[in-house]
Amino acid sequence: MQTKRTIFPNKLLPYVLLLPQLAVTLIFFIWPALQAVKSSFEREDPFGFRTTFIWFENYTRLFADPNYVNSLSRTAVFAVSVTILSMCVSLLLAVAVNRVLRTNRIYTTLLVWPYAVAPVVVGILWWFIFNPTIGILPYMMRGLGVAWNPRVNGDQAMILVIIAASWKQISYNFLFFVAGLQSVPQSLTEAAAIDGAGPFKRFFTIVLPLLSPTTFFLLIVNINYAMFDTFGIIDATTSGGPNQATNTLVYKVYADGFLGLNIGSSAAQSVILMLIVIALTAIQFRFIERRVQY
Amino acid sequence: MATINLVDLHKDYGNSHAVRGINLSVADGELIVLVGPSGCGKSTLLRMVAGLETVSSGRIEIGGRDVVKAEPAERDIAMVFQNYALYPHMTVRGNLEYGLKNRGTPRAEIDRRVNEAAEILEIGPMLDRKPRQLSGGQRQRVAMGRAIVREPAAFLFDEPLSNLDAKLRVQMRVEIRKLQRRLKTTSLYVTHDQLEAMTLADRLVVMNGGLVEQIGTPTEVYDRPATLFVASFIGSPPMNLLPVSALGNTQGLNLPAGTDMVGIRPDQMHLEPRPGATALPATAELLEPIGGESHLHLRLDSGHSVILSVPGRPSITEGTAVTVYIEPAALHPFDSKTGRRTDA
């Protein structure tokens, strides 16, 4: 692609034109980030009277803290599960809709709705559905002999937030998968059919490889989503509990900083999160265009 | 090696009828070209034979076996698509092997066939490239290769050359013909290009509106078009069609009963007097020199436009009065009400 270069006669003008955007970035992104880095090296007393510079003590304490290490692994389990669940379900739905010829627009519209629901509302919705006292699912599960109580059972709480978080993300993935599927030329699947490949073989050897750019893009987006955008869902359903079972990294930043008032540790945690985001973004930029193409 | 029989084949989409009762027998090793304007049902017909479209009614037999209910894979056919339909994520070798692997062909046999096809089509050096690294002509060869390695009972070609530029198209056309002669595989070939149809076909099937207008060898179809449609569709420039009244006195022409239209090929109208020829006065409107011959557009004094194809570059300026001579034997008599030939 060719980009057109503009030549400015005045050397200062381009910088002036960039200034508003730079100002916004500096004030709302760079400065708070630097503040976080700064306070991650400090210890503050609960009343905010005194701060001491303590180098990396916040970090060393974090990694010595079993709660934090636990939270790291919980986050990994949560992110991987949400990504796999939401992507598999949405791919299944997309394939189903792609097979329908006449009414696929209606299905698409209906399936996109959950994306418009705010995370907290999603959380509350699933909280009600899974509520051990008034929820419909626990009622049915009791009938099947399953004791369901996510307020007591940590694994069940994790399942609950995974389902709630995946449900919300399915619409987004679905849209991309439908678009991806529609860009696979029909003649390819026809050629494969003549070449003796059954429907499943066609899907796995022709369609899925051709979807790989979409799949990889969604993989990154979903991991990012599960790790960083699910605060509302967790807050509204389990609040990180029971017994830290659903305390993901993002939720722990909030819990330690705003509920526990341990600003230094919370800042150190957000710096680590920031590094994870940077790593994920770097992977995305580096590999998405190079690795996944055909 | 197989014959293909189509018996009273129909395809309806709701109330519209794409294919309306086709009967066709393709002999073993024969190359049949289905030709017609777009929307005439030729591609639908081919896709029905391939098993990519369901059949509304009728029978399809490949090698004597009724395949109407068979999956595309079970029909022992290979198809070359208009857009090549190469698998973009596989190498050329992967593309060629795919169909064989799916059928559980032994490795040694796969390698033998792939190498053989690569040699025939001269795509050996490209076996490890991806389709996007190939030119249009090379992709076309790979698409052909994918059909060849299968060693199927029949080849189906769906306008395989229409994405190529004019020069490459002529070249590939010759190669397809040579290849088909060499392999002697029964083939159905769909095109809208009448030149392609004429040069490739053992027999032509001219289609229009879901029906067969005429089946015959290219020369038969050219020399004795069965209907007005075929007369106007086959031949370039197209046959001149005139009402009988435009010929003036028709007494000596011996036209069969019911004839009210006549067709004359552009190269069967002459500017020099011929014995026994009918003379028609006309005015020159446009001269198009196209190299070895020229197309002369005339308006007859009866008001009808005709095109003559004359050798060389006659020195006729626009607006000059000329006389056109037509020999009675060159006339194709038609009945415009039925659209059919009256001397059949």
Image (cartoon, coloured by chain):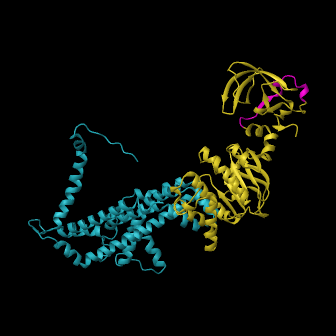
Chain colours: A cyan, B yellow
Quadrant holding the N terminus of chain B: bottom right
Taking depth in this image into account, of B183 and B188 the one nearest to the observer is B183
Residue B65 visible (yes or no): yes
Residue A275 percent across, percent down from the top left = 27, 65
Is residue B319 depicted above or below A191 in this figure? above
Residue A37 percent across, percent down from the top left = 19, 64
Residue B38 percent across, percent down from the top left = 67, 44
Q: Residue lying farthest left?
A: A50
What residue lies at 43% left-to-right and 64% top-to-bottom? Answer: A167
Taking depth in this image into account, of A264 and B116 the one nearest to the observer is B116
Choose top left, top right, bottom left or bottom right for residue A260: bottom left
Q: Does the magenta portion include B25?
A: no
Is residue A195 depicted above or below B9 in this figure? below
Choose top left, top right, bottom left or bottom right for residue A98: bottom right
Magenta-colored span = B236-253
Residue A243 percent across, percent down from the top left = 29, 77
In the image, is B120 to the left or to the right of B334?
A: left
